[in-house]
């Protein structure tokens, strides 16, 4: 579910016409829907109601303070992977006592900061890290709450770059080795064993891998509960969302596939809960989940304007003002994003509703699409959003919405080609507000200093 819809021929986010937001703040521009994020959070929270649970939002998916505040106010905890993310959570008024600190390479400085501020748990990924935390905690006369990250060795059936729970990955500790590492941890004076954690990957679109990972780790959870009285089992994040709807070319079909810019979760919250709640309930332990993409992915779009149309002997290109530095997912993960014109290509009389098949076929001749590459201005051939996509005819100046850009979008943006970072805006009901200023050229060189010789 998300709240992006055509209304009167204009793509709206909740009750706001996206063209207005682009006019006010310029492009490229990320726009997020607060209503969508809260809707996802509330649904997940309700589905997990049979469990003693805590939703720790994975901050790395989208760490804008306004988003963190929204989720923190709704009751969420946070899953962080760096000291910088903890700093952001604090800046957003989040509850540090509900923060879990993950990541394979925590630094001394990060550990000290997290210890002093009192995170709920350090999710420890190796024995070496465990020893290091023990030492740092001892210098502060504190006990560090820890959970070890289990690597259950399951195949999450997702892109190799976002698979984290199989043997070959750098993440976690193999199930067979965990009991002895917990034994060592139990002997460390400045370590307090509080839980066990896992996270098998991202953009997982079926319940099976979650269920099998849980069933593999369950015997260990029971053992740890009776031996060390652990308080929680964190099953990680990774719930996938819909990026792609089957695309058939052809006039009316384009509408069928693109008309109602709505998409649900790849598999519903219900499917997820049905698979995980019964076995977890039986365990009788507090359950943590760490969703990132699921909460924010479909809640954001990247607005971009067509600068030029370029026709070569081979192909037609729409060159837009957003580039791979703004949204790297297509280049990095070969990922698919729907792209729709903000001005509805073939508006129909019925407002607020999807055209009937009858009116579609009447409009058949009008609804011409053409194959086009939508590319950015960055000097890389990998700088594209779509290749050979059937689109309605595009023109210079057209405003486009790259859908499902709320997670791992702005977060992975860079200044490559010395392009200032895009602005971000948040919509709530009929209001919209800037939540990050567009960078300026001065920002690009700020912090650079002359060599002192
Ligand atoms: C990235 C990450 C998540 C969130 O993954 P999503 O696929 O966005 O839900 C959760 N837990 C850990 C430890 C992570 O590294």
Image (spheres, rainbow, N blue to C red):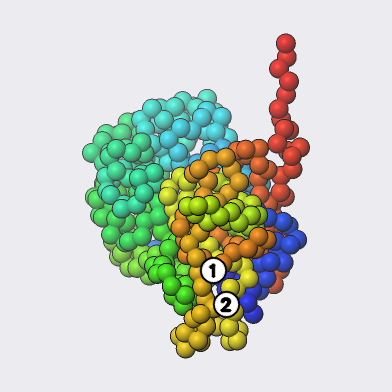
Image position of 93 (left or right of 168):
right
Depth check, front residue: 308 or 376: 308
Depth check, front residue: 452 or 360: 360
Depth check, front residue: 292 or 422: 422
Asked which quadrant contains residue 432, the reply is bottom right
Q: Which mark is residue 346?
A: 2
Spot occupied by residue 162 in the image (x, y as percentages of width and height): 39, 46
Q: Mark 1 points at which residue?
A: 392
How crowded pointer 1 is (Cα within 10 Å; few <14, some 14-19, many 20+) is rated as many
Q: Do the residues labelled 1 and 2 touch (CB within 8 Å)?
A: yes
Task: Say what secondary structure mark 2 lies in.
Answer: loop
The first of marks 1 and 2 along the sequence is 2
Spot occupied by residue 1 in the image (x, y as percentages of width and height): 49, 70
Residue 234 visible in image: no
Residue at 68% x, 52% y: name it: 423
Indicate if the residue with disc 1 has its beta carbon within 8 Å of ligand 1.
Answer: no
Spot occupied by residue 304 in the image (x, y as percentages of width and height): 63, 57
Q: As drawn, which residue projects farthest toward the front?
A: 313
Residue at 36% x, 56% y: name it: 204
Spot occupied by residue 220 in the image (x, y as percentages of width and height): 26, 47
Residue at 60% x, 73% y: name it: 344
Image position of 414 (left or right of 81):
right
């Amino acid at each position: 579910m998300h709240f992006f819809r055509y209304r009167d021929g204009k793509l709206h986010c909740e009750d706001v016409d996206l063209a207005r937001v682009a006019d006010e703040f310029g492009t490229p521009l990320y726009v997020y829907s607060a209503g969508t994020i809260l809707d996802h959070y509330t649904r997940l929270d309700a589905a997990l109601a049979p469990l003693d649970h805590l939703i720790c939002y994975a901050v790395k998916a989208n760490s804008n303070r306004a988003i963190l505040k929204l989720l923190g106010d709704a009751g969420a905890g946070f899953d962080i992977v760096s000291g910088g993310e903890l700093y952001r959570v604090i800046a957003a008024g989040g509850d540090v006592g509900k923060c879990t600190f993950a990541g394979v390479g925590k630094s001394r400085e990060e550990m000290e900061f997290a210890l002093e501020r009192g995170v709920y748990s350090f999710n420890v990924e190796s024995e070496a890290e465990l020893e290091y935390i023990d030492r740092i905690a001892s210098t502060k006369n504190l006990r560090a709450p820890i959970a070890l990250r289990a690597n259950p060795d399951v195949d999450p059936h997702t892109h190799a770059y976002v698979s984290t729970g199989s043997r070959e990955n750098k993440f976690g500790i193999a199930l067979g080795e965990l009991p002895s590492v917990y034994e060592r941890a139990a002997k460390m004076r400045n370590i307090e064993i509080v839980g066990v954690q896992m996270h098998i990957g991202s953009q997982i679109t079926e319940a099976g891998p979650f269920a099998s990972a849980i069933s593999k780790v369950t015997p260990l959870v029971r053992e740890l509960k009776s031996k060390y009285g652990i308080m929680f089992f964190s099953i990680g994040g990774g719930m996938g969302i819909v990026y792609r709807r089957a695309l058939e070319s052809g006039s009316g079909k384009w509408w069928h596939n693109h008309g109602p810019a709505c998409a649900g979760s790849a598999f519903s919250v219900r499917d997820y809960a049905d698979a995980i709640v019964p076995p977890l309930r039986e365990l009788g332990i507090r359950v943590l989940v760490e969703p990132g993409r699921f909460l924010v992915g479909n809640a954001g779009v990247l607005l971009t304007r067509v600068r030029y149309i370029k026709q070569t002997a081979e192909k037609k290109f729409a060159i837009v003002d957003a580039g791979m530095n703004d949204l790297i997912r297509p280049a990095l993960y070969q990922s698919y994003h729907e792209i729709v014109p903000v001005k509805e290509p073939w508006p129909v009389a019925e407002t607020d509703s999807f055209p009937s098949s009858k009116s579609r076929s009447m409009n058949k001749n009008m609804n011409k699409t053409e194959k086009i590459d939508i590319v950015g201005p960055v000097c890389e051939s990998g700088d594209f959003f779509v290749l050979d996509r059937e689109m309605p005819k595009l023109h210079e100046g057209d405003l486009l919405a790259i859908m499902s850009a709320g997670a791992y979008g702005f977060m992975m943006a860079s200044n490559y080609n010395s392009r200032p970072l895009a602005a971000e805006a948040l919509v709530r009901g009929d209001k919209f507000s800037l939540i990050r200023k567009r960078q300026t050229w001065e920002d690009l060189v700020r912090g650079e200093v002359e060599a002192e010789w």
